Image: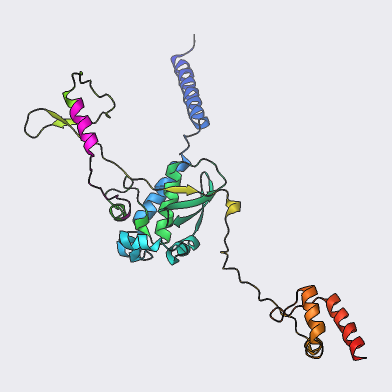
């Protein structure tokens, strides 16, 4: 028979080994890895709110032409306008969890154009790069996604540039007659199932339920221009036409002055003229031999 103390120590030793085994198993299980895309988006979201607290400084690179729809439309009449060329030179090169991206703002399309070697990039990553772009180049109002920062920032350009003017609806007489005929026709009115299911709320008068219109949001526009190899850092300037060099020779002028008949025949044969005073080496050599022969 073992004494009670030894039995107790054996149970205590077994329990200690069990605890050590549990600790070693927990150490072997790796902790869950954080999503790199979510971390990148959160990092840029915090950065734009930190850098763009002063809205006046955050939009100091924006010209007032963007805050007038009429002035903006007049700007686009010129294909090589200054603002469009200027913003093409303000490009951002950044690394993301989905590869490198080069981005600049397209004034004509009112969106962010980008180059990337990755074919499919999620909208959240592109949106995060746009946050970095507008905060770096001080153009916060170019960021038109009104779902990301509804309390921090909603771009005024949404109501200026992107809102379409509503034209008064005019109906022809034929359309009105067709509607009247359909209203009085002996057909059963079927329920329209094509309407989107919108949330309902109690009517203010208490008479029943009414549909609540779903809120429409605006997203940023992104234009893919291809791979990074297609991006050209240097902008090409206007090509200059080289001036045509005219041939001039004292021998040629003396030949025309001394031998007008021979000169006229030579112009008819070779197509020479006084306005285009050009000559190749073979014609020059023949003219020189002819002049020497006539002078002799």
Measuring from the top left, give residue 81's x and y in whole percent. Answer: 44, 65
Of residues 226 and 264, the one drawn nearer to the viewer in this rendering: 264
The quadrant holding residue 50 is bottom left
Residue 277, image x, y percentages: 73, 80
Between 76 and 293, the residue placed more toward the observer is 293
At horizontal 45% and vertical 51% (from top left) the residue drawn is 129
Residue 72 shows in this picture: yes
Q: Residue furthest top?
A: 1
Q: The C terminus is located in which quarter?
A: bottom right
Could you tell whether 295 is left or right of 9 in the image? Answer: right
Q: Residue at x 34, y 54 (%)?
A: 49
Q: Nearer the viewer, residue 241 or 193?
A: 241
Residue found at the very far front of the displayed protein: 261
Boundaries of the magenta span: 161-182
- The spot of residue 255 in percent (x, y) is 81, 87
257 left or right, relative to 34: right
179 in relation to 243, above or below: above
Q: Position of residue 220 (x, y in %)?
A: 39, 48
Asked where in the image residue 213 lies, by quadrant, the reply is top left
Relative to 273, is 109 on the left or the right? left
Residue drawn at x 63%, y 72% is: 241
Q: Is residue 172 magenta?
A: yes
Vertical position of residue 70 compared to residue 20: above or below? below
């Amino acid at each position: 028979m073992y004494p009670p103390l030894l039995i107790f120590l054996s149970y205590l030793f077994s329990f200690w080994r069990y605890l050590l085994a549990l600790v070693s198993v927990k150490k072997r299980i790796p902790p869950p890895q954080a999503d790199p895309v979510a971390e990148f988006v959160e990092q840029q979201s915090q950065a734009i709110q930190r850098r763009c607290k002063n809205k006046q400084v955050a939009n100091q690179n924006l010209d007032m032409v963007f805050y007038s729809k009429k002035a903006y439309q007049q700007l686009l009449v010129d294909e090589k306008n200054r603002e469009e060329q200027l913003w093409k030179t303000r490009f951002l090169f950044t690394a993301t969890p989905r590869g490198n991206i080069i981005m600049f703002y397209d004034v004509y399309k009112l969106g962010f154009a980008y180059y990337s070697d990755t074919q499919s990039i999620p909208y959240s990553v592109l949106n995060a790069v746009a946050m970095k772009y507008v905060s770096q180049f001080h153009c916060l109002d170019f960021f038109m996604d009104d779902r990301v920062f509804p309390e921090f920032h909603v771009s005024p350009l949404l109501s200026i540039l992107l809102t379409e003017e509503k034209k008064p609806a005019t109906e022809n007489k034929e359309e009105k007659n067709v509607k009247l005929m359909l209203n009085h026709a002996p057909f059963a009115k079927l329920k329209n199932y094509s309407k989107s299911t919108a949330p309902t709320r109690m009517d203010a008068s208490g008479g029943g339920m009414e549909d609540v219109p779903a809120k429409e949001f605006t997203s940023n526009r992104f234009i893919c221009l291809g791979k990074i190899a297609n991006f050209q850092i240097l902008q090409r300037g206007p090509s200059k036409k080289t001036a045509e060099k005219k041939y001039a020779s004292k021998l040629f002028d003396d030949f025309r002055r001394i031998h007008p008949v021979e000169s006229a025949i030579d112009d008819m044969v070779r197509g020479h003229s006084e306005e285009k005073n050009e000559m190749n080496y073979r014609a020059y050599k023949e003219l020189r031999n002819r002049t020497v022969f006539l002078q002799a």
